Image: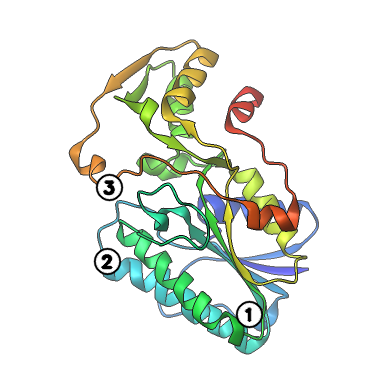
Amino acid sequence: MKILVTGTDGFIGNAVASHLVNVGHQVEGWTYIPNKYPDPSQCDRVIHCGAISSTTETDVEKIMTQNTDFTMKLIELCDMMGTSMQYSSTANLYGNTNNFNETAPLLPESPYGWSKYLVDRFVQSYMKDFKINIQGFRYFNVYGNGEDHKGDQMSPVSKFTKQAKAKQDIKLFENSENYKRDFVSVEDVCKIHEKMLDVDQSGIFNVGTGEAVSFKTIAYKIAYKYGVGVNLIPMPKEIAKNYQAYTCADNKKLQDILNYEFEYVIDWIDRQ
């Protein structure tokens, strides 16, 4: 299958493209250029991973242009050309809640979350009118190898591991036993994209393991593995005000289709 993958200069897009090549697909990469769009007619499928993914980005116009406007236009182009599409969404749009079903109220708390919310609403509103299959994937907290370029936006798993490998004490926010995330490996994300290529069904799907693990558990697991300590630090107020306390995917909708076996983060850390 010939597949166009956008965002190949980013963490997930690069991983997805590499994985698809490794399993035998022909892949063309695309990086965002203002006012330019790829030609979906030249491929069998489009996987749109490109976006400004920083939850702390404050330039609303920039985020809406790249994340919302570009994605909606690309969806319209795919529909015109008859090329089915997958796109990246996010669990960030659920907000600070304990309800992570795809039908739950959406309460995004950042410009990034809102930019993804608007795309999901667009897709849900017009899904029955599309001539193509369109699948949106609400990633939970993705981690894995290849995050170094993300700086402060690296997942806690990668950030803690980088500190520990440098023989530095891990810096952990105080009260991190109260902050839990559904950590899903980028390897599993890639395999979900691959397997869903063969599924003749549109929809928006949560992509997460269905298990939440605390930041404290992750930090101490990595610290023990590499023989370093943990240094507790206060959480800055600008981070605390919009900080999700908990995420955990309700992945039944996806699992009813794939029955996929996710690798849990503790096992992934052991494997490294």
State the quadrant of the C terminus: top right
> Helix, strand or loop at disc 2?
helix
Does the rendering let one see residue 81?
Answer: yes
> Type of residue at label 3?
Asn
* Residue 113: image location, x then y, percent: 37, 60
Q: Are marks 2 and 3 in contact (CB under 8 Å)?
A: no
Mark with earlier residue (2, 3): 2
> Helix, strand or loop at disc 3?
loop
Vertical position of residue 117 compared to residue 148: above or below: below
- Residue found at the far left of this picture: 237
Q: Quadrant of residue 109?
A: bottom left
Mark 1, residue position: 40
Mark with earlier residue (3, 1): 1
Mark with earlier residue (1, 2): 1
Mark 2, residue position: 60
Mark 3, residue position: 242
